[in-house]
Image: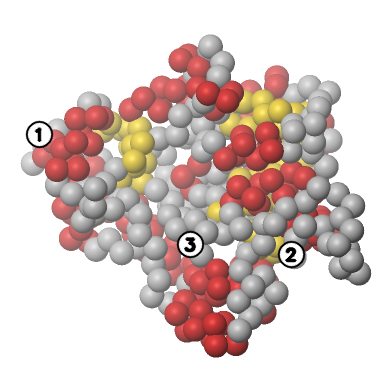
Amino acid sequence: MSFKYPVSRPALDGKELEYLTATVEDGWISSQGPMVQRFERAFADYNGVAHGVACSSGTAALTLALRALGVGPGDEVIVPEFTMVASAWAVTYTGATPVFVDCGDDLNIDVTRIEEKITPRTKAIMPVHIYGRRCDMDAIMDLAYQYNLRVVEDSAEAHGVRPVGDIACFSLFANKIITSGEGGVCLTDDPRLAGQLAHLRAMAFTKEHNFLHKKLAYNYRMTAMQASVALAQTERLDEILEARRAIEKRYDEGLADVPGITLMPPRDVLWMYDLRAERREELRAFLADASIETRLFFKPMSRQPLYLHPDWPSLKANVFAEDGLYLPTHTGLTAADQDFVIGKVRAFYGVS
């Protein structure tokens, strides 16, 4: 079904076409093209981090980060219950085991419950900045210090939240704050980790490029065409974030007094405008009839078939999953578009 008001739409009105055209005309369209390095440098500089390593997806970024930190079979990684399944999959890809921690009222990992899940096998903590809300990184970094753990930040939904962990991983999928269609990027201040990330993403070729590969690696490279789009997006990131802040404010003001709607805590950056709704499925059908797309909250990792645990119905993550949704959230929304969406939500709950 095609919606007049989709949940997401990329903002491609910067220099994307200019940079992409230049890349095609130059002929350097592979991962060896100079646009990849330009994007890596620009994104790292924006975040105040020394090194950026671009790759093929956010999931690839997480997998590379864990591998670069030496995570593998027999290890455990602390992962939130409330997240997109790729966070857990990246751990499973390495042969390690994800250990899940329930969420707090802001949907982020409940930092008060992390310590009880740490065992001698724990190697890393993976906080996820859900829907653009920054996790309590001070508490997480303190725990990592106490237990000598590494921290991989899943920042797929949080462009603009500055990293503090060992490696931060961003998605550049088409629905993210900035995009290259498909793509990802890892950020780190550690030059050895940056080198290992780059080595692993490119099939672990040696300097001699003699087709002897000493470790299992990946073809997780980003093309110069993708990097051309990502660079143009990075140049406009402040502008995009400001436009999204205005969207958040307008929804907050328009929906604050609606019975049946529970607004969620403020976001540090706005990826998606999430809320909780009574009679959620009826509301979704009502909005769909008005050509307004909505999406559901993530389901708990312990409800996923691969990680199924019988306690999943009692999780706070499941309570949120049962009535949560998000509304159209992209910079192409006009004030009139938002007013239309807000008006339809208000009408459903009988508010003028």
* Residue 40 picture location, percent across and down: 66, 69
Closer to the chain start, of discs 1 and 2, is: 2
* Nearer mark to the viewer, of 2 and 3: 3
Q: Residue shown at 56%/16% (left/top)? A: 309
Q: Quadrant of the C terminus?
A: top left
* Residue 189 picture location, percent across and down: 77, 59
* Residue 73 picture location, percent across and down: 80, 31
Q: Please, which residue is most extreme toward the front here?
A: 211
Residue at mark 1: 350
On screen, 112 above or below 182?
above
Cα–Cα span, label 1 and label 2: 52 Å
On screen, 219 above or below 135?
below
Q: Residue shown at 36%/46% (left/top)? A: 273
Q: Please, which residue is most extreme toward the top here?
A: 310
Cα–Cα span, label 1 and label 3: 39 Å
- How many C-alpha atoms fall within 10 Å of the one at disc 2: few (<14), some, or many (≥20)? many
Which amino acid type is marked by label 1?
Answer: Gly
- Which of the pair 197/79 is nearer the observer? 197
Closer to the chain start, of discs 2 and 3, is: 2
Q: Kindly state the secondary structure of the residue where label 1 is placed.
A: loop
Residue at mark 2: 51
Cα–Cα span, label 2 and label 3: 22 Å
Residue at mark 3: 181
Q: Kindly state the secondary structure of the residue where label 2 is placed.
A: strand
Q: Is residue 124 left or right of residue 162?
A: right
Which amino acid type is marked by label 3?
Answer: Gly
